[in-house]
Structure formats: structure tokens, C-alpha cells
Amino acid sequence: MNAARDTRRPAEPAKTQRSEARRMGAWREHHAWSLSISLRRLAARPLSTLLTVAVMGVALALPLAFYLLLGNVERMGDALGRNQSISAFMKPGQNGAMAETAASALRGRPEVAEVVVRTPKDGLDELAEVQGFSGSLQSLDVNPLPYVLSVQPRSGLSAEDAGRLVEAMKATPGVDMVQDTGAWRQRLDALLGVGTRAVSLLATLLGIAALLVVGNTIRVDIQSRSAEIGVLLLVGASRPFVRRPYLYAGLWLGFLAGVLAVVLAVTLELAMAGPVGRLAAAYDGSVSFGGLPAWLLLSVPFAAALLGWLGARLVSARQIRRAAAV
């Protein structure tokens, strides 16, 4: 008896492993079936699916368009406003050696990328090139212009660091006046901050709208199949089993809408390529424009698929619970 009992014991773990393997196989097969049947159901009603994907795609493309606009405004600001040179006018009577001494002191600061000393003759030559000034300048006996230090701030300098640099330039010995576009930089930073917050809020609101669109589509689908769902629940099907095809339907809707949003965003970039190129040429190439980053375009379909799955899960759980109660 003991020997017989001992020979039966090792068979129990093997039987349990086979049972677990069968359950896992059935689970994988149902997931594969749910993935395919959900896509076939969407294809069976093309107009409804197309409208849902189009609404979600446009809703998701709007934040991408605003993000593209905001990024290019920031690039334009970097080229035209945030890194413009700051001019320091030396006091009358300062000579070239004194101007070089002040320039050397400013070059040692971490906020400064470059300092160029402009002599009074350089300033006079620039004025001579301006129409209407050449005749007047010829009558001058003495050059009244001072030495000027043209300071180029470091790239990406914040408004606070630029303000400290201006104060340091004003305190430099021999400097009479500092001409700065600090107000423009502060306004630009404030504008970009508002734009960034607005894009974030818009993306959140439109994401919620896309979630509601998916949820309403799945709700209508479940209601149209309420009798079928009731039969499945009566024969012992679990709620996750019944809900799974609808979750995959939300996944498909979100993914297709994300792909459409990327296509619309890239189309917008291509449509703006001509005017952007002419604008950049007008600024001699100093203004650079760029498109949406590749990582963002690749992540949008998967983020939209997750959003569609979440909307389907929230609605399907409630609808199937109501069907089970009937």
C-alpha cells in the first residue's frame, strides 16, 4: 500500500502542470481570437469606425500642431530675440586700451560667449553706409562716437542670467550705458510659458474627449449585443472573458486614430515647408525651423491605443455588469 501510494504522488504535480499549460493555452487563444474578432467587427461597420477614428485622430492631431507651432516660435525667439547681442557704450574719452580691458573682464564671465570691441571708426563707417548720413559725416572734424562693446550672450541663456549679465556690464569700469533687449526676452519667456501650459491643458482635454468617443462607441456596441452577452454569462462565461473583445476594439480604435493623427501632423509640416523656407531665406538662414521629433510621432499611436483601451475598459465594465443584472 505504501509503495502504491508513493507511485501516485509524483503524478499530481505533472497533472497540475498540464492543467496550467492548458489554461494558459486557452487564455492565449482567446486573446488572439479577441484581437481578430474585434478588428473584424470594426471592419463590418466601416462608416461608424471611420467616423470614430476621424474624430479621435483630429482631436489628437491638434495638440501635435500646437506643439509644432510652439517649438518653432521658441526657435525663432532663440535666433531673433533671446540671444541678441548686448551693447555697452564706453564713456567719452575712453581709449582702445581701456575698452580692451573692459572687454577682457566681460569675457571671463560664464554668461558671455563672445565680446567684440567696435571702435569709433567702425561706428562712423556704419553710419556712412546709411543713406543721407554720408554728407553730414564729412563735415565732422572730430569723431563723436565712443567705443562700443558688443557682447554675445551664451546660447540658451535664461532671462534671469541675462539680467545679471546686464547689471555686471553696467558696473564695469568705463561703461557709460548698456543697450539691452531684456524686456523682449522676458516677454518671450512668459509667452512660451503660457503656450506650453496651454498646449498641456489642450492635450489633456482632447485626450479626455478621445476617451469619451471610444467609450460611447463601445457602449453602443455592447448594447447592440446585450442578448448575446446575457447568454454567455448564463452558460458560465466570466466577465473578463466577455469584456476582452471590446477592450481590443478600443485598442484598435485608439491605435488607428493615433496613426491618423501622425499623418495629419506630418501633412501639416509638409504644407508649411514652402512658406517656412521663404521666411528662413528672408532672415539669411539665421532662423531655423524644425518638425516634430521622431520619438513623439512614434509614441502617439501607442499612447492613443492605451487611451482607447482605457475608455473601453471603463465603459465595458459597467455595461456588462448591467447586462448581468438583467
Image: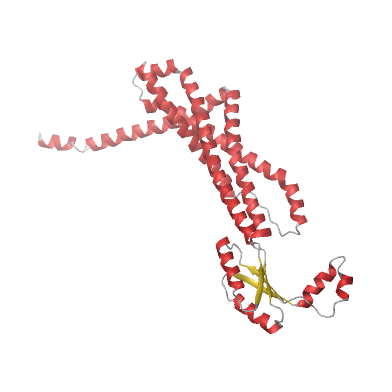
| Left or right side of 205 for 124 | right
Q: Split into 4 quadrants, where in the image is the N terminus?
A: top left
Residue placed farthest to the right in the image?
A: 135
Residue 236 higher or lower than 148, as above or below: above
Q: Position of residue 219 (x, y in %)?
A: 47, 23
Quadrant in the picture for the C terminus = top left
- Give coordinates of residue 171: x percent, y percent: 59, 74
Q: Nearer the viewer, residue 143 or 311?
A: 143
Q: Residue at point 64% right, 47% down?
A: 69
* Viewer-proximal residue among 41 and 167: 167
Whether residue 33 appears in this view of the structure is no
Residue 66 to residue 11: above or below: below
Return the residue nearer the eye: 38 or 323.
Answer: 323
Q: Is residue 161 visible?
A: yes
Which percent across, then down, holds residue 320? Answer: 40, 23
Q: Residue at x 41, y 33 (%)?
A: 28
Judge left or right: residue 318 versus residue 278: left
Q: Residue furthest left?
A: 1
205 sits left or right of 326 in the view: right
In the image, taking residue 212 as reference, residue 152 lies left or right, namely right
Give x and y (percent) for residue 288: 69, 56
Q: Residue at x 88, y 76 (%)?
A: 139
> What residue is rendered at 56% in x and 71% in y?
110
